[in-house]
Amino acid sequence: MAGEGAAADMRTKLTLGGGMSFLALGLLFTSLLAMFGSLLWGFIPYWAPFMFTNLLALYTGVWGVLVAVLAPIATAILFQDPNSVLDAPANVGQTLLFLALMRVLRVDIGLRTVDDCIKYLFITMVSAATGGAVAWALATAFGHAPTEGGLHFTGLWMFENTTPAILPGIWLHRVVSATSQPFTESENTHPKSWMRRTLEYTIPWMATLVIISTLLGVMLVSRHTGATGFWDEFLKNATTTPALRIIALVLSISILFSVGIAVQQARQSWTLVEAVRRHMPNRRLSELLTGGAAIPTEQRLVTVVFTDLRGFTETSAQFEPGDLVTWLNTYFTHMGAVIERHGGAIDKFIGDGIMIVFGLQSPDAQARQALLCALDMLVEIEAWQKASVARGLPAVGMGVGIHSGIVTAGEIGSPQRKQYTVIGSVVNTSARLESASKGVPDGALPLVLSHEAAKHCGLLVHPERDKILLAITVALKGVVDVDSAWSVRADGVGELRAAMSGAIEAIKLR
């Protein structure tokens, strides 16, 4: 039932603007398909819209049902055929029956198995036959009885609705279902942007098909009749001009395939953008990269944070490899949420450690945000540890090192593989400060803050400095310009948060 879960998720997240856009696009599709269907059958049927509106209804809920309601009315207005309004109850009824049967028979709307495909075709035929019978009964009751008998009319209606459901209907279901899945896994996904991108890809396809079909239709009608009346001549010559029927059939199928192709392109494009965004420190750089622009190499003032798990080597020996990866990914997920909340950029994961950079987007309050982020990460890991221990998993600790300074930021690597990162002595010093956090005295957090970072935080001149910070002496391997640093007193965290938050708000107001 994964497909139904995806559909439900998209229905709840579809905004009014997105729904109106899909409604307008759905009506455009159904109107075009009705026009081509009239060339095939000699009157205005709904060639393929039933399959299309079912697809919309499964993924957009009420918006798809609205398309089924309004499609006959729209075509009646466009083609000046008021009798087709009588088809509206039949279209709505068969769509609702289709949705109900899909749920009752528990069909995966992605149609991934043969069993699901068979059920889907059965449901399509049953609901279409019901719609055809209702349409014939209404037309007869209101004095517009079709020339065909009820059984004949219902058979034609069912054939017309079922044929597109086979090709390309099954393929379209699989395309749309596969596309929705990457954007329904968590609250951090972007279904609205994906839908907007789908529209951006679909509308040019449709505009091109409209222009081509209109030009071909005008040329053929003028050639065969010499007349200038467009739609009337289309209907008059639909049954006598085989070329028009062939073109109508090809364009109908082209429209349906264009939907699937556009959705696939939207998926590939958006997946690429999201993949790049996850590997770049900020959205500006990811947009530059996906837009084909060069990533600049620049000198920047940043604050680098290194974290590392304590006791990880001993802990990892207690896990199977797959369980260890799952455990680590859970830890990184928790830490990543904290880092994102504070505006930091994860530069890389180093085993069980994390390198985080603040200041790539804006230099304002970067050191303060880094320190607040480190405090929240220590709180988060404590809560995560308690939950892990309750499940029988081992407890671990975490150390943090923070340093501020000038780095070189840019793409590093070979032509075959590059990574956007920051390099310089600041990175090395931050890593060494993290190692030094193992030796902080009792009463202090396992966090070491360099003199430069403390200065950028404004803590060195803060009146409550001695209540917040604890001066420590460090000997950093490979670092000669740092011999003193600061840790945070465990009983001074409240004062530190108040001081840092106030300073950050003051900078934001300027």
Image: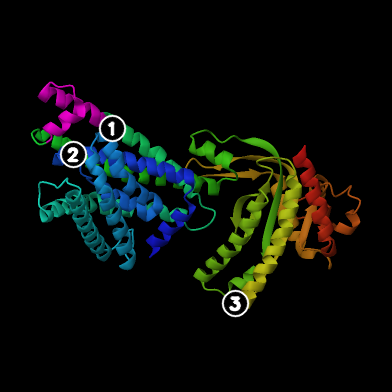
Are dots 2 and 1 in contact, CB under 8 Å?
no
Which amino acid, by three-letter code, is at mark 1? Val
Q: Marks 3 and 2, Cα distance to the nearest angstrom? A: 65 Å
Q: Residues within 10 Å of mark 3 (few under 14, many from 20)?
A: few
Identify which residue, 260 or 18, lies in the foreground.
18
Q: Position of residue 262 (x, y in %)?
A: 35, 42
In the image: residue 2, left or right of residue 336: left
Relative placement, left or right, of 409 versus 62 is: right
Instruction: Answer whether residue 235 is magenta in the image.
Output: yes
Q: Residue at x 32, y 36 (%)?
A: 206
Q: Residue at x 10, y 36 (%)?
A: 239
Residue 505, picture quadrant: top right
Q: Which residue is mark 2?
A: 38
**What is the spatial separation of the Cα atoms under label 1 and label 3, in whole angstroms?**
61 Å
Number of numbered tags placed on the structure image = 3
Q: Earlier in the sequence, mark 2 or mark 1?
A: 2
Q: Which mark is residue 210?
A: 1
Q: Is disc 2 surrounded by few (<14), some (14 to 19) or many (20+) residues within 10 Å?
A: many
Disc 3, SS: loop
The residues colored magenta run 212-238
Position of residue 483 in the picture relative to residue 314 (left or right): right
Amino acid residing under circle 2:
Ser
Q: Which residue is mark 3?
A: 391
The question of residue 408 being in magenta is answered with no
* Three-letter amino acid code of the residue under disc 3: Arg
Which of 280/270 is in front? 270
Q: Position of residue 193 (x, y in %)?
A: 48, 44
Give the Cα distance between marks 2 and 1: 16 Å
